[in-house]
Amino acid sequence: MNRGLIGFLAFLAVLLLAFGVAAYVLGPNMLAFIFHGDRRTEPVVIVNLVDFVDADHAQTYARDFETPAIGLIATLGGHEVWKASAADVVHGQLQDGWSSLDLVAYPSRAAFIELVTSSDYRALLGARDAAVKRAATYAATPIEPSQNAFDPQDTQAQALRFMTGAHADSIATYDSKWLGEDAQMLERHGGVLLWRARLSPLVADEAERFDEILVYGFRDTEMRDEWVGDTERETLQTLQRRLFRRDVLVLSDAQQMVQPPAPTAVLDAPPASPPAPVDATNGAADAPAAAGASDDSTAPAVDQVPTESNEP
């Protein structure tokens, strides 16, 4: 065997090893997200669940992480869609409650990757990590009749349902057998299915790896509470239990969303050049002519740094 072939095989082995390590560290869902065929063109909604250390840390999180992060997201064409509490667990375990749920829309997966791998965003992670006990991040794919644009309509109270199928056909069975009955029960109490999406966990513990999220809306809290306490609704969820390994129901109320700060420069852009010196004899700048005059020079393009992260 000649040296060239040996060198090629060694390089190939190293490449495969590196890919295997990346797959192990990132996980299959994250790799599928990064290498998605429509990653540069297809919009995506990122679902963030956060559990704060305490109320003081929640304020620190909003000031030192969330507000500047929303500004960075805006520079990439993204925006916060909906923010709500998710702490009051009706069906599930104590750890199924979260301080906050946040839906953030991005124009593409590439935009989200650019955000989380930028130095500007990563500089904020220390403040985030100090304020939260745990967090989970999902890529959401809306299911008809839901649209990418989440719309709470005129509802004043909401409920969240997270489901993890026990079998490969669990969700399909739910759709064909139970979804219609759940919709009738909602309608009886003035409720509606606002949004439904498949979830792909990007960063989440095993117990938090849900397959779907459903957001229910109600005209007021009283109607929602009557729906929750309806014994027929409880029976329906009990009958559906064999379909799901996890089936969590959490009461939710909309929270005030963060207003993005004034637009900032492009992520990781180099500093602007200092102003050109002025010729004192005639007041004209020793630089290219002002806008509107002819000039063959062009400004150098700003390189965009590809990126990736787990929140928001």
Image: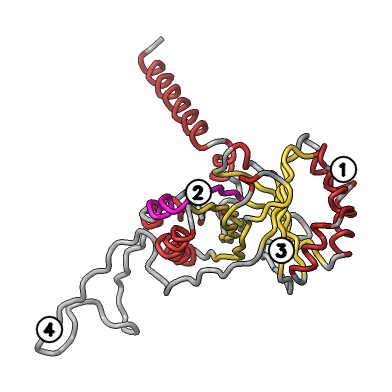
Q: Which residues are magenta?
A: 125-139
Are the residues at dot 2 and dot 3 in contact (C-beta closer than 8 Å)? no
Identify which amino acid the numbered label 3 is placed on. Answer: Gln
Identify which amino acid the numbered label 2 is placed on. Answer: Asn
Name the residue carrying label 3: 158
Q: Quadrant of residue 154 in the image?
A: bottom right
* SS at circle 1: helix
Name the residue carrying label 1: 239
The image position of residue 116, as x and y in percent, is 45, 52
Q: Residues within 10 Å of mark 2 (few under 14, many from 20)?
A: some
Question: Which corner quadrant holds the N terminus?
Answer: top left
- CA gap, disc 3 to disc 1? 23 Å
- CA gap, disc 4 to disc 2? 51 Å
Above or below, 189 against 90 in this view is: below
Are the residues at dot 3 and dot 4 in contact (C-beta closer than 8 Å)? no
Are the residues at dot 4 and dot 2 in contact (C-beta closer than 8 Å)? no
Image side of residue 276 versus residue 294, left or right: left
Q: Which mark lies nearer to you, 1 or 4?
A: 1
